[in-house]
Image (cartoon, rainbow, N blue to C red):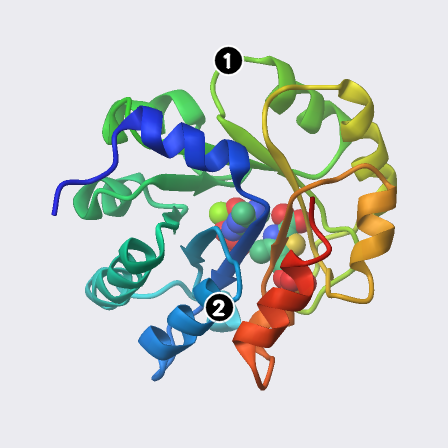
Amino acid sequence: MPGLSGDQIRKRLDTARLYLCTGDRPDLAEFADAALAGGVDIVQLRDKRDDVPLEARQELAALEILAEACARHGALLAVNDRADIAAAVDADVLHLGQDDLPVPLARRIIGDEPVIGLSTHDVTQARAAAVEDGADYFCTGPCWPTPTKPGRPAPGLDLVRAAAEFGTARPWFAIGGIDAERLPDVLAAGASRVVVVRAITEADDPAAAARALRSQLP
Ligand SMILES: Cc1ncc(COP(=O)(O)OP(=O)(O)O)c(N)n1
Ligand SMILES: Cc1nc(C(=O)O)sc1CCOP(=O)(O)O
Ligand SMILES: [Mg+2]
């Protein structure tokens, strides 16, 4: 099946509100189907148990499963960190952190079609991601300290408020410690898009958990 064009990917990114990062798991296909049915717009494979990334072959196998689920639901498939893997699987999205490959170098590897996202953790980084050429979207966080990213200091909702004040047209997402109970505070701080891990991956009913988040988003 041919992949989405760059224009199609950017249109879907514009309307995306709920972004899920998930590790590999034995029920990955069923889990992804449930989360996507609940309203997830973008799914990223992010498997860093004990901070150790997956071997490339394992990552490819898991991404093949997620690619099928995303295609079934019209969602975007995201690869974390690795431009080579994103290019190999024709991913829609490559997500980079501040210590990963710089955006222009990753762009050389993946070409013009996929979108690139960038993590930011303070106002200087967020402003750069909002105004400079390069990233197509950015994330601000963590909103709360989170065991999913141990040791990462949380700038909290102050960074969300600052990002909202930029008034950028570039899509941006709040991340870190967000669940259905905390989401109203994140929205009140000015975000309209969120990324979650545990709020869906640890839910007994991933579809219901995704719905509980999606129903609060604009
Ligand atoms: C959508 C999204 N936002 C932020 C991150 C975190 O990226 P990074 O800081 O590179 O940390 P790791 O996830 O690579 O451990 C993300 N992966 N996805
Ligand atoms: C992967 C990641 N990146 C963050 C950042 O601030 O860039 S916070 C985070 C973990 C988010 O997991 P949860 O929803 O379980 O708290
Ligand atoms: Mg990274």
**Image location (x, y in percent) of residue 177:** 73, 62
Along the viewing direction, whichever of 79 and 216 lies nearer the viewer: 216
- Type of amino acid under label 2: Ala
Along the viewing direction, whichever of 118 and 206 lies nearer the viewer: 206
Residue in the image at 39% along x and 40% along y: 94
Which of the 4 image quarters holds residue 208?
bottom right
**Image location (x, y in percent) of residue 100:** 46, 39
Residue in the image at 71% along x and 39% along y: 121
Along the viewing direction, whichever of 174 and 42 lies nearer the viewer: 42
Residue in the image at 32% along x and 74% along y: 29
Of badges 2 and 1, nearer the viewer stands 2
**Image location (x, y in percent) of residue 126:** 69, 28
Identify the residue under disc 2. 35
The answer to whether residue 93 is above or below residue 102 is below
Is 125 situated left or right of 135 in this image?
A: right
**Image location (x, y in percent) of residue 2:** 13, 41
Q: Quadrant of the C terminus?
A: top right
Task: Note whether residue 144 is visible.
Answer: no
Residue 133 has which mark?
A: 1
The answer to whether residue 40 is above or below residue 11 is below
Residue in the image at 59% along x and 79% along y: 202
Task: Note whether residue 73 is visible.
Answer: yes
Q: Secondary structure at mark 2?
A: helix
Which of the 4 image quarters holds residue 199?
bottom right
Alpha carbon distance from label 2 to label 1: 32 Å
- Type of amino acid under label 1: Asp
